[in-house]
Image (tube, grey):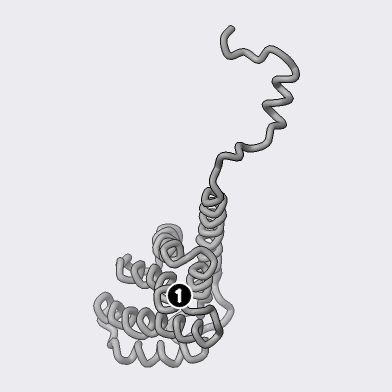
């Protein structure tokens, strides 16, 4: 019949042949970045789901924000934003904590994106990283989150911004 394997040599050739060499190097890079993105997403969700042993006023101290910032430096700004946004949505779907508000999803996505935006093409030195991450945290944690808390829950934004400033100083 047409397409049938005719010899043992053909079977050996089919099963032990090298992968096609016609894939460009960018395919390998894309696969690597996609795999790292999925791993960072899983790590974000795992860390966010585990209760922290360190209590903080009004909740528990979480370290998932670190994963968002790290994902940017491993896989780039757009994929860092995907880790933040998709991670927030999936974490909420698995462990809802209050009403869903898309502003918090936006904040998570920006936490993964903004450090890269502020770093730009500058060399990855400690002072540059400190400024880039600090600027991103000021926008997300000191400005956006307190405004969203006031909008959703009616909590005073200035009080929450002050608390976030103290918290970010120790991160």
Can residue 92 be seen here? The reply is no
- Residue at position x 43%, y 83% from top? 58
Say if 130 sits above or below 32 in the image: below
Which is nearer the eye, 159 or 4? 4
**Image coords of residue 80 (percent x, y):** 45, 66
Which is nearer the eye, 31 or 50? 31
- Residue at position x 51%, y 53% from top? 30
- Image quarter in which the N terminus is found: top right
- Determine whether, in the image, residue 161 is placed left or right of residue 35: left
**Image coords of residue 101 (percent x, y):** 30, 67
Can residue 59 be seen here? The reply is yes
**Image coords of residue 118 (percent x, y):** 41, 78
- Determine whether, in the image, residue 135 is placed left or right of residue 45: left
Say if 59 sits above or below 75 in the image: below
Number of on-image labels: 1
Secondary structure, mark 1, is loop
- Residue at position x 37%, y 79% from top? 140
In this figure, which residue is indicated by the disc labeled 1? 121
Say if 33 sits above or below 57 in the image: above
């Amino acid at each position: 019949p047409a397409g049938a394997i005719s010899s043992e040599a053909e079977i050996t050739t089919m099963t032990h042949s090298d992968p096609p060499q016609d894939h460009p190097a960018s395919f390998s890079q894309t696969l690597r970045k996609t795999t790292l993105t999925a791993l960072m997403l899983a790590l974000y969700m795992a860390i966010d789901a585990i209760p922290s042993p360190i209590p903080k006023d009004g909740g528990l101290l979480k370290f998932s924000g670190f994963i968002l910032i790290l994902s940017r430096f491993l896989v780039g700004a757009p994929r860092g934003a995907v880790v933040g946004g998709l991670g927030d949505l999936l974490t909420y779907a698995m462990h809802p904590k209050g009403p869903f508000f898309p502003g918090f999803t936006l904040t998570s996505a920006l936490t993964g994106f903004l450090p890269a935006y502020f770093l730009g093409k500058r060399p990855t030195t400690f002072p540059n990283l400190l400024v880039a991450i600090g600027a991103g945290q000021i926008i997300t944690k000191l400005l956006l989150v307190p405004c969203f808390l006031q909008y959703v829950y009616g909590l005073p934004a200035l009080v929450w911004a002050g608390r976030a400033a103290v918290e970010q100083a120790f991160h």
